[in-house]
Image: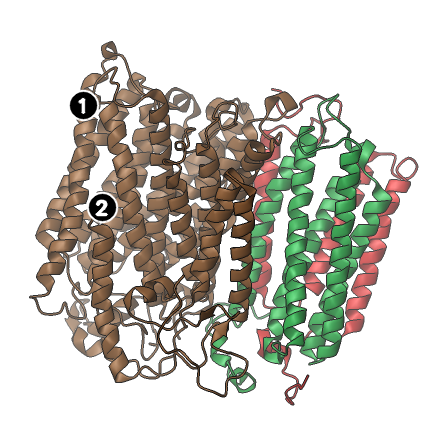
C-alpha cells in the first residue's frame, strides 16, 4: 500500500486537541494500573469473608475502584485530558444527569432502606411497599 | 428505488470514487424535480418536507379529534364503540405529540437554524435527510395499524399493566411501540446533528450570546431530546420485549412493578412537553420584536430562562404520578420543583409583554398568533400551577380539567406559535406572502374555536367528567358543555381549512403580483439577509456578525436622543449572488434507503421473522453504502454556473407546487 | 485547557493543505471536528440509556422466591473477571491503534485494530457462553424479573460491543483498501471513542451487576 509521503500532521491540526497525545508507553502504564485495579476488584470476591466482611466497606471499595477505572479510561484513553473541555462537559453532563435522575427514581421506589443500604434480598418486594 | 437516469459519470482522475456506490446506485445529482426531494440533503428541503408531512399528520390527528368530539356530542351516543374510542383518542394524542408538534418544531429548526447562524447547511446533511425519512416512515408505520387490526388503545402514555398482551391483545400497541422507536431514532439523530451545527458552524462573529432566540430555544430543545429520548427508548424496548417475548418487566405476577413504566415514561415525558413548547417560544421571540419594532426585552433572561426550563424539566416528572402512591416525601419534593419551574416560564411571559410595551405594534397575523400564544399559554400555565398542589391535583387527575390544561399549553401555546411562524416565514420559504385578510380570519376563527373547545373542559373537568370515557349519562350536567366543545372543534377544523385555502389562493394570486422582495416584514435577524425564497446556497458570501439583530442594525442607526433613523435600504443589504463556486453537500439515496429498512424490520417483529431479515439486509446494505460514499461528491457540486442557478429558481417554484400537491388533496 | 476559546470562533488555516477533501471538515467554532463532537454528544445520551437499563436491573435483581435461580447461584465471578480483563485490554489496543495512525504508522494501526476486534469477539464469545450456561441452569428470559432484567441489560451491552466490532472490522478493511489516509485518522479515533465507552459501561456493569452483593 503506497502511503502519501507527507510529514505527520500535528494532533491539534487534525482534531483540535489542546495537547499532543502521549506516547504509547503512557497508555501501557494506564492499562497496567487498570489491570491492577480490576485485580483488586476481583480479590474482594475471594476475600469477601475476611477483609470485606462488612458489606458497606465492600460496596464502598468496589464503587471507588469503579469510579477510578471509569475516570482513567475516559481521561486518558478517550483523550479527555488532551481535548477541549467542551467534550468533557458534554459527556459528563449526560452522565451526571443520568445519575441524579435515576438516583431520584430509585429513591422514589424506596430502593434504599433506612440505613441507606439496599433492601435485603429476601425482602419480597421492597420496591412496592409503602 | 429508481436509478438516476441523468448522465452522472464522474470525470476521470478520481479513482477512489467510482460513480456507483456498492455497485447499486449512481450518485444522485438532481437538484430539481421530484428526485431532488427523495435524495436531497438540503436542510431547507428537509425542513419543508418535515412541515408538509406534519400538516398531513395534523389532518389525520384532527380527524381523530373530530371523531372524539362527535362521539361526545350527546350522552349515550353510539357513533364509536368503547373499543374504537380507546383507539381513536390514543392515536389522536400520539399523532399530535409525536407526528405533528415535534415535527413542526423540527421543520422550523431545520429550515431556520442554519440560516440564523449563517451556515450553508447542517453539520451532517445526509443524517438530516435520514432523520426526516425515518420520522415519515415511522409515522406511516404507526398509522398503518388502523388497517392491520386496529390502533393502540392504552392512551398516549400507555400505562402498565394495561399495555400488556393480556389487556390489549391486538397488535395496536406493538405498532405504537415500534413506530415510536423509529421516530425516536429520527429525533435522536437530528438532535445530535443540530447541536453540532449550532456549536460548530456559526458565522464569524456569531458568538453564542449573539444568536437569535429561536436558535437558542432550538438548541435547548435538542439537548432535551438528546437526554430524554434514551429514557423512552428503554421504556419502549422493555415494553416491546414484554409484549413480543414475554419478558417480566411489567408483569405483577413476577414481582414487577408497573410504576417502572410510569417513571421511565414521565422522565422522558416531562422534558418532552418542554421540547414541544420551546420552539414556539423561540418563534414568537422572533416575531414580537419585529412587529413591535423594539429589541427583545431582556435577551439574556429569555435565553437563560429557556436553559433553566430545560434543566428543571428533568426534575418534575413525578407530578404526573401524584395519585400513584409515591409516598408523602416524593409528592412534596415534586410539588415544590413543579412550583419552581413556573418561575422561568413566567420570566419569559414578562419579557414578551415588556417587548411589546411601548412598541409601535403592527397587528399583522404573526403578531396576532403570538399574542394568542402568550394569553392562551398563560391560562394553561396557571391551570398547570394548580396541578402542582398535590391535594388539588388528586381531584383533577384524569378529568377533563387536565385535558383542558394540556391543550391550552400545547395547542394554545405550541400550535399558535407555529401558526405565527408559518405566516411570518412563509415569504422566506416560498417567496410569496400569505393573504393578511384571510390570515386574520384564520386567527380569529382558530382563537374562537380553540376557546370554545377547551374552555368548557375546565368546567366539566372540575364537575368530575373523566377523560377517556367513551360516553356519559345525561343527568350529570355535562351535556351543554360537551355540545359547545364539539361546535368549537368543528370551528377549529374550519380554521385549518382556511389556512390551507389561504396557502392555495395566495400562491395563485402571487403569480400576478411582483416578487415579495427581500424584507417584507422589516425584520431583524440574520436569515433575512438572504433573498426570498432562500437560494440553495443560503449565503454567498458568509456574513460576519457584529451584534444581536445584526440585519436590523445594518438598516437602522440610533440617534443621540434614542430614536431610530433608517440609514440603508434592505435592498442594499440583502445578498444578491448567483452562488457561483459555492460548494454544497451532495444528494444521496442512502438516507431514504436506510430509513426504509426500519419499518420493514418492525413489520417483521410483529408478523414474520422473514421480514426482519429482509429489513435487516436493507439496513446493513444502506449503512455500508453510506459509509463508503464520500459525504461530498468531489466533482459534482462544485461551481454553480449561471444556468444552473437559473434552474434553481425554477426549482423553488416547483417546490411550492410539490408542497401544494402534498397538502391540497387531503384538505 | 482553552476554556475561553470554547465559544469563540476559531479560524484555523493549514488543515486544508494536507487534506484533498478538506472542505468536508470545515473549520469549526469550537475547534473540534463535527464528527467527534457528535460522537461525544451521542455518548452523553447513551449514559441515560444504560442508566435506565441499570436502574431496571437494580429494581429487579432479586427474583421472587421459587422463580428460578438467583444471582448467587448463577454468577461465575472468575469467568466474568477474565472476560472483563479481555474487554479492558481491548481498550488499550484501541488507543494504541489511534496512536499508530496519528504517527502515520498504518501497519501497526491495522495490527492493533485487528487485536481490538479479536479481543471484542472474545468478550462476546464469553457472553454467549455465559448466557447459554445460565439458560442451562434454569434462567430463561421469561423465568423471572431477574432473568428479563439481566439479559436485557447485558444483552444491550453485548449488542453495543457487536456493533463496535463491526465498525472495527470495517475500518480494517477500509484501511487495507487504502481508503484510510492520515487526514481521515479521526475516523479511527471516533470509533475508538465508541469502543472505550462500551468498555466503561462494562466497568460499571461488572462492579454493580456482578461484584456488589
Residue for point 49% across, 44% down: B602
Q: In which quarter of the image is residue B535?
A: bottom left
The percent coordinates of residue B179 (x first, y second) are 45, 43
The mark found on residue B666 in the picture is: 2
Residue for point 58% across, 62% down: A87
- Looking at marks 1 and 2 on the same chain, the residue that comes earlier in the sequence is marked by 1
Query: Chain A shown in which color?
Result: red
Q: Which of marks 1 and 2 is in front?
A: 2
Asked which secondary structure carries label 2, the reply is: loop
Asked which secondary structure carries label 1, the reply is: helix
Q: Quadrant of the C terminus of chain C?
A: top right
The percent coordinates of residue B567 (x first, y second) are 17, 76
Let me know if residue B130 appears in the view: yes
The number of discs equals 2
Residues B648 and C31: in front is: B648
Q: Quadrant of residue B343?
A: top left
Q: Which chain is green?
A: C
- For this orientation, the residue located farthest to the left is B512
Q: Are marks 1 and 2 in contact (CB under 8 Å)?
A: no
Instruction: Using residue C158 as the reference point, say whether residue B305 is left or right of it.
Output: left
Residue for point 74% across, 56% down: C121
**Chain of the residue under label 2:** B
Residue for point 37% across, 36% down: B147
Up the image or down, B66 lies above or below C121; here it is above
Q: Quadrant of the N terminus of chain C?
A: bottom right
The percent coordinates of residue B49 (x first, y second) are 32, 57
Residues B555 and B456: in front is: B456
The mark found on residue B483 in the picture is: 1
Up the image or down, B618 lies above or below B546; here it is above
The mark found on residue A8 in the picture is: none
Query: Chain B shown in which color?
Result: brown
Instruction: Using residue B666 as the reference point, say whether residue B270 is left or right of it.
Output: right
Amino acid at each position: 500500500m503506497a502511503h502519501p509521503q507527507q510529514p505527520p500532521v500535528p494532533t491539534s491540526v487534525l482534531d483540535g486537541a489542546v495537547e499532543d497525545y502521549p506516547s504509547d508507553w503512557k497508555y501501557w502504564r494506564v492499562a497496567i494500573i487498570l489491570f491492577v485495579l480490576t485485580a483488586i476488584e476481583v480479590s474482594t470476591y475471594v476475600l469477601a469473608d475476611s477483609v470485606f466482611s462488612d458489606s458497606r466497606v465492600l460496596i464502598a471499595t468496589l464503587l471507588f475502584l469503579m469510579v477510578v477505572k471509569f475516570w482513567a479510561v475516559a481521561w486518558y484513553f478517550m483523550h479527555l485530558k488532551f481535548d477541549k473541555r467542551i467534550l468533557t462537559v458534554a459527556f459528563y453532563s449526560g452522565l451526571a444527569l443520568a445519575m441524579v435522575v435515576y438516583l431520584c427514581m430509585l429513591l422514589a421506589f424506596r430502593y434504599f432502606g433506612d440505613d441507606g443500604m439496599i433492601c435485603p434480598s429476601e425482602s419480597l418486594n421492597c420496591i412496592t411497599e409503602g | 428505488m429508481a436509478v438516476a437516469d441523468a448522465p452522472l459519470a464522474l470525470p476521470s482522475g478520481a479513482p477512489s470514487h467510482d460513480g456507483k456506490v456498492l455497485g447499486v446506485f449512481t450518485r444522485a445529482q438532481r437538484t430539481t424535480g421530484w428526485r431532488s426531494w427523495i435524495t436531497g440533503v438540503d436542510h431547507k428541503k428537509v425542513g419543508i418536507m418535515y412541515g408538509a408531512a406534519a400538516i398531513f399528520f395534523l389532518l389525520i390527528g384532527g380527524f381523530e379529534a373530530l371523531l372524539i368530539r362527535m362521539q361526545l356530542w350527546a350522552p349515550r351516543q353510539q357513533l364509536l364503540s368503547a373499543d374504537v374510542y380507546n383507539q381513536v383518542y390514543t392515536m389522536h394524542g400520539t399523532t399530535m405529540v409525536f407526528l405533528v408538534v415535534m415535527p413542526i418544531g423540527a421543520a422550523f429548526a431545520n429550515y431556520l437554524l442554519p440560516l440564523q447562524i449563517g451556515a450553508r447547511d447542517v453539520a451532517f446533511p445526509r443524517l438530516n435527510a435520514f432523520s426526516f425519512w425515518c420520522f415519515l416512515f415511522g409515522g406511516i408505520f404507526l398509522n398503518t395499524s388502523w388497517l392491520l387490526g386496529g390502533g393502540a388503545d392504552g392512551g398516549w402514555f400507555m400505562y402498565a399493566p394495561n399495555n400488556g398482551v393480556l389487556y390489549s391483545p391486538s397488535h395496536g400497541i406493538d405498532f405504537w411501540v415500534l413506530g415510536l422507536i423509529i421516530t425516536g431514532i429520527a429525533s435522536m439523530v437530528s438532535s445530535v446533528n443540530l447541536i453540532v451545527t449550532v456549536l460548530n458552524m456559526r458565522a464569524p462573529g456569531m458568538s453564542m450570546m449573539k444568536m437569535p432566540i429561536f436558535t437558542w430555544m432550538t438548541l435547548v430543545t435538542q439537548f432535551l431530546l438528546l437526554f430524554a429520548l434514551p429514557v423512552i427508548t428503554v421504556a419502549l424496548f422493555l415494553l416491546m420485549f414484554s409484549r413480543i417475548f414475554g419478558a417480566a418487566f411489567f408483569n405483577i405476577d413476577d414481582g414487577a412493578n408497573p410504576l417502572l413504566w410510569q417513571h421511565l415514561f414521565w422522565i422522558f415525558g416531562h422534558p418532552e412537553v418542554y421540547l414541544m413548547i420551546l420552539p414556539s417560544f423561540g418563534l414568537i421571540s422572533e416575531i414580537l420584536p419585529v412587529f413591535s419594532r423594539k429589541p427583545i426585552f431582556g435577551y439574556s433572561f429569555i435565553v437563560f430562562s429557556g436553559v433553566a426550563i430545560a434543566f428543571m424539566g428533568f426534575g418534575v416528572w413525578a407530578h404526573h404520578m401524584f395519585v400513584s402512591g409515591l409516598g408523602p416525601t416524593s409528592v412534596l419534593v415534586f410539588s415544590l420543583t413543579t412550583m419552581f419551574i413556573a418561575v422561568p416560564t413566567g420570566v419569559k411571559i414578562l419579557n414578551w409583554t415588556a417587548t411589546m410595551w411601548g412598541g409601535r405594534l403592527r397587528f399583522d397575523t404573526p403578531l396576532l398568533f403570538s399574542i394568542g400564544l402568550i394569553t392562551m399559554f398563560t391560562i394553561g400555565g396557571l391551570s398547570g400551577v394548580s396541578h402542582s398542589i398535590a391535594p388539588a391535583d388528586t381531584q383533577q387527575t384524569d378529568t377533563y380539567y387536565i385535558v383542558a390544561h394540556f391543550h391550552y399549553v400545547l395547542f394554545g401555546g405550541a400550535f399558535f406559535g407555529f401558526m405565527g411562524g408559518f405566516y411570518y416565514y412563509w415569504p422566506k420559504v416560498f417567496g410569496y406572502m400569505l393573504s393578511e385578510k384571510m390570515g386574520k380570519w384564520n386567527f380569529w376563527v382558530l382563537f374562537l374555536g380553540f376557546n370554545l373547545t377547551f374552555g368548557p373542559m375546565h368546567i366539566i373537568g372540575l364537575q368530575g367528567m373523566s377523560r377517556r370515557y367513551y360516553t356519559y349519562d345525561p343527568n350529570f350536567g355535562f351535556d351543554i358543555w360537551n355540545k359547545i366543545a364539539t361546535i368549537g372543534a368543528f370551528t377549529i377544523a374550519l380554521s385549518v381549512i382556511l389556512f390551507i385555502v389561504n396557502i392555495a389562493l395566495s400562491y395563485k394570486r402571487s403569480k400576478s403580483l411582483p416578487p415579495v422582495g427581500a424584507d417584507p416584514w422589516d425584520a431583524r435577524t440574520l436569515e433575512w439577509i438572504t433573498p426570498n425564497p432562500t437560494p440553495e446556497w443560503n449565503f454567498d458570501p458568509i456574513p460576519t456578525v457584529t451584534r444581536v439583530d445584526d440585519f436590523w442594525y445594518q438598516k437602522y442607526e440610533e440617534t443621540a436622543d434614542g430614536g431610530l433613523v433608517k440609514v440603508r435600504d434592505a435592498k442594499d443589504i440583502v445578498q444578491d449572488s448567483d452562488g457561483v463556486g459555492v460548494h454544497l453537500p451532495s444528494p444521496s439515496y442512502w438516507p431514504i434507503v436506510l430509513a426504509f429498512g426500519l419499518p420493514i424490520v418492525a413489520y417483521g417483529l410483529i408478523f414474520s421473522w422473514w421480514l426482519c431479515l429482509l429489513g435487516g439486509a436493507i439496513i446493513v446494505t444502506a449503512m455500508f453504502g453510506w459509509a463508503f460514499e464520500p459525504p461530498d461528491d468531489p466533482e459534482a457540486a462544485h461551481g454553480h454556473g449561471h444556468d444552473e442557478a437559473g434552474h434553481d429558481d425554477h426549482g423553488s417554484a416547483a417546490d411550492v407546487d410539490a408542497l401544494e400537491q402534498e397538502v391540497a388533496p387531503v384538505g | 485547557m482553552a476554556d475561553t476559546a470554547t465559544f469563540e470562533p476559531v479560524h484555523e488555516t493549514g488543515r486544508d493543505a494536507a487534506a484533498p477533501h478538506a472542505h468536508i471538515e470545515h473549520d469549526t467554532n469550537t475547534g473540534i471536528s463535527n464528527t467527534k463532537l457528535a460522537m461525544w454528544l451521542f455518548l452523553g445520551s447513551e449514559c441515560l440509556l444504560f442508566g435506565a437499563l441499570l436502574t431496571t436491573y437494580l429494581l429487579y435483581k432479586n427474583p421472587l422466591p421459587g422463580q428460578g435461580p438467583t444471582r448467587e447461584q448463577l454468577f461465575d465471578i472468575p469467568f466474568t473477571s477474565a472476560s472483563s480483563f479481555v474487554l479492558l485490554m481491548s481498550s488499550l489496543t484501541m488507543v494504541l491503534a489511534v496512536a499508530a495512525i496519528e504517527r502515520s504508522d498504518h501497519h501497526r494501526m491495522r495490527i492493533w485494530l485487528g487485536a481490538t476486534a479479536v479481543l471484542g469477539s472474545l468478550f462476546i464469545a464469553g457472553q454467549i457462553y455465559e448466557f447459554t450456561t445460565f439458560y442451562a441452569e434454569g434462567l430463561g428470559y421469561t423465568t423471572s424479573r431477574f432473568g428479563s432484567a439481566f439479559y436485557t441489560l447485558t444483552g444491550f451491552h453485548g449488542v453495543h460491543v457487536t456493533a463496535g466490532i463491526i465498525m472495527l472490522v470495517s475500518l480494517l478493511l477500509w484501511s487495507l483498501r487504502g481508503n484510510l489516509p492520515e487526514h481521515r485518522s479521526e475516523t479511527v479515533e471516533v470509533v475508538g471513542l465508541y469502543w472505550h465507552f462500551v468498555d466503561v459501561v462494562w466497568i460499571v456493569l461488572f462492579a454493580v451487576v456482578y461484584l456488589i452483593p
